[in-house]
């Protein structure tokens, strides 16, 4: 399954917080790839772009939504507060994408948007 990785990034957070969020997203993406999925991880693709004043949160979401609309079959949400990730989840729900849980990366939720397999991120 083609899975979009969604989770906190934090454009205005200290660099250490951003780096930790990228590390978590990268781990989830690698775990999903190892389980046989294809992934798009915006955290690793655009890491460091927050320093480019030409790019706004709206522009990032436009890019993310294009992957959700035209590429993704599912979405994996990393826990944590995030305005952007919340918007991605709303869009994924609107599109009817499947929700993929992190600890059971070989499983997908086939019950539809809004339902997810119980669990959380592992170390």
Image (cartoon, rainbow, N blue to C red):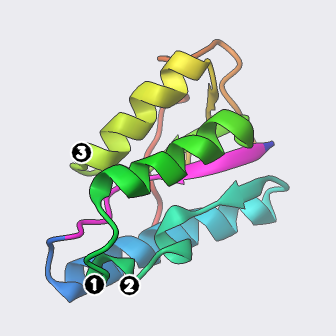
Q: Is residue 6 magenta?
A: yes
Task: Name the disc covering residue 48, or none.
Answer: 2
Task: Name the element at disc 1.
Answer: helix
Q: Are marks 1 and 2 in contact (CB under 8 Å)?
A: yes
Task: Name the element at disc 3.
Answer: helix
**Residue 99 against residue 101 in the figure, above or below:** above
Q: Quadrant of residue 22?
A: bottom left
Taking the image as shown, residue 118 lies to the left or right of residue 75, namely left
Front in this rendered view, residue 120 or 92: 92
What is the magenta range?
Answer: 2-11
Q: CA distance from mark 3 to mark 2?
A: 18 Å
Q: Which residue is mark 1?
A: 51
Residue 104 seen anywhere in this rendered image of the structure:
no
Q: CA distance from mark 3 to mark 1?
A: 19 Å
Residue at x 35%, y 71% (from the top left corner)? 21
* Within-10-Å neighbours for mark 3: few <14, some 14–19, many 20+: few
Percent across and percent down for residue 79 are: 34, 49
Taking the image as shown, residue 107 lies to the left or right of residue 117, namely right
Residue at x 33%, y 83% (from the top left corner)? 19
Front in this rendered view, residue 117 or 47: 47
Percent across and percent down for residue 100 are: 61, 38
Q: Are marks 3 and 1 in contact (CB under 8 Å)?
A: no
Task: Name the disc covering residue 83, or none.
Answer: 3
**Residue 70 against residue 14 in the figure, above or below:** above
Percent across and percent down for residue 120 are: 43, 47
Q: Quadrant of the C terminus?
A: bottom left
Q: Are marks 3 and 2 in contact (CB under 8 Å)?
A: no
* Within-10-Å neighbours for mark 1: few <14, some 14–19, many 20+: few
Front in this rendered view, residue 48 or 25: 48
**Residue 37 against residue 122 in the figure, above or below:** above
Percent across and percent down for residue 18 are: 28, 77
Q: Quadrant of residue 51?
A: bottom left
């Amino acid at each position: 399954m083609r899975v979009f990785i969604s989770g906190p990034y934090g454009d205005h957070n200290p660099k250490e917080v951003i780096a930790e969020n990228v590390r978590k997203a990268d781990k989830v993406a690698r775990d999903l790839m190892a389980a046989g999925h294809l992934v798009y991880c915006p955290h690793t693709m655009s890491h460091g772009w927050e320093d480019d004043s030409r790019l706004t949160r709206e522009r990032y979401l436009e890019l993310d939504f294009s992957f959700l609309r035209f590429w993704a079959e599912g979405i994996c949400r990393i826990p944590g507060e995030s305005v952007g990730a919340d918007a991605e989840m709303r869009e994924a729900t609107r599109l009817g994408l499947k929700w993929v849980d992190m600890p059971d990366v070989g499983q997908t939720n086939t019950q539809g948007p809004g339902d997810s397999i119980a669990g959380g991120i592992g170390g």
